[in-house]
Amino acid sequence: MSVPSATLKPTMGSLERLRGSLAPLMTIMRRLRDRETGCAWDREQTFETIAPYTIEEAYEVADAIARGDMADLKDELGDLQLQVVYHAAIAEELDAFSLDDVLAAVADKMVRRHPHIFGEATESPGWEALKAAERGSKADGSALAGVALALPALKRAEKIQSRAARVGFDWPDISGPRAKIDEEMAEVEAATTDGEREAELGDLLFSVVNYARHLGINPETALRGATARFEKRFRRVEEIASKPLNNMDIEALEALWQQAKREV
């Protein structure tokens, strides 16, 4: 899509009038991606090269929330909005869709999914029921359709399992997924090749996620907590060790670990 050069030169006054909207950010992005006068790095980017940054920015938003840092959250939300504008600018150049199309589509979706607020329904039919109806209208009508491939593995496993459970494909109680863990552990131990071990370990992790789901525990949150505890205790081990850890035997390391667990 050809953009008139005049639109690529925002003035401070014009940007100030548009503060609070995404319009100035899109104007800046168009300028950065201008083939003649733009930034060499920015104009070479594609959906594929920018996607990892989009994921990273979403994690940084979540991190700021977890830390309760509102100033950082403000900045990270801005960075995440930049990712939306970046993708929309690339799509605009391909005549695929515009930023206005993106915003209009999500606004329409929110209205459509809240008929009890914006329509004549007296009560909500349920968010998941509405999403399921939307999936059913698409070519891929599977109950598993639309679960993003780029989700963290634990989160994607949980969402796939939850989708299957909604249509009745699930254990009747927690004893099933608990027994499955033992079964998969035995298969890991019986594997004889690297390929078999990798596949069986994947099945074991999938089973643990299923067990967590039946316990009502978010496996991603649980693992993040476990990792954070390990990190805190390992740092304490480093502080109290009398010599480099790689010069200590397992008994000494275990003693330090137990002390760290008592202290932090």
Image (spheres, rainbow, N blue to C red):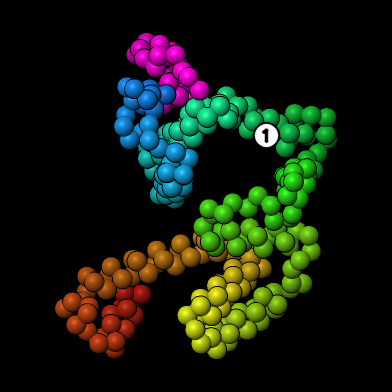
Q: Quadrant of the C terminus?
A: bottom left
Secondary structure under the numbered disc 1 in the rendered image: helix
Q: Position of residue 127 (x, y in %)?
A: 72, 44
Whether residue 106 is situated above or below residue 213 in the rendered picture: above
Q: Is residue 54 visible?
A: no
Q: Which residue is mark 1?
A: 110
Whether residue 143 is situated above or below residue 57 in the rendered picture: below
The residue positioned 39% from the left and 27% from the top of the image is: 33
The residue positioned 61% from the left and 61% from the top of the image is: 158
- Count the marks: how many? 1
Q: Position of residue 52 (x, y in %)?
A: 43, 47
- Going by the image, does 248 lie left or right of 46? left
| Nearest the eye: 168 or 202 | 202
The residue positioned 78% from the left and 47% from the top of the image is: 136
Whether residue 261 is situated above or below residue 147 in the rendered picture: below
Image-quadrant location for residue 171: bottom right
Image-quadrant location for residue 105: top right
- Going by the image, does 121 lie left or right of 102? right
Whether residue 83 is situated above or below residue 136 in the rendered picture: above
Based on the picture, tell me whether residue 11 belongs to the magenta stretch: yes
The residue stretch that appears in magenta: 1-29
User: How many residues crowd mark 1 within 10 Å: few (<14), some (14–19), many (20+)?
Assistant: few
Q: Position of residue 49 (x, y in %)?
A: 42, 44
Image-quadrant location for residue 208: bottom right
Q: Residue furthest left?
A: 243
- Going by the image, does 239 lie left or right of 189? left
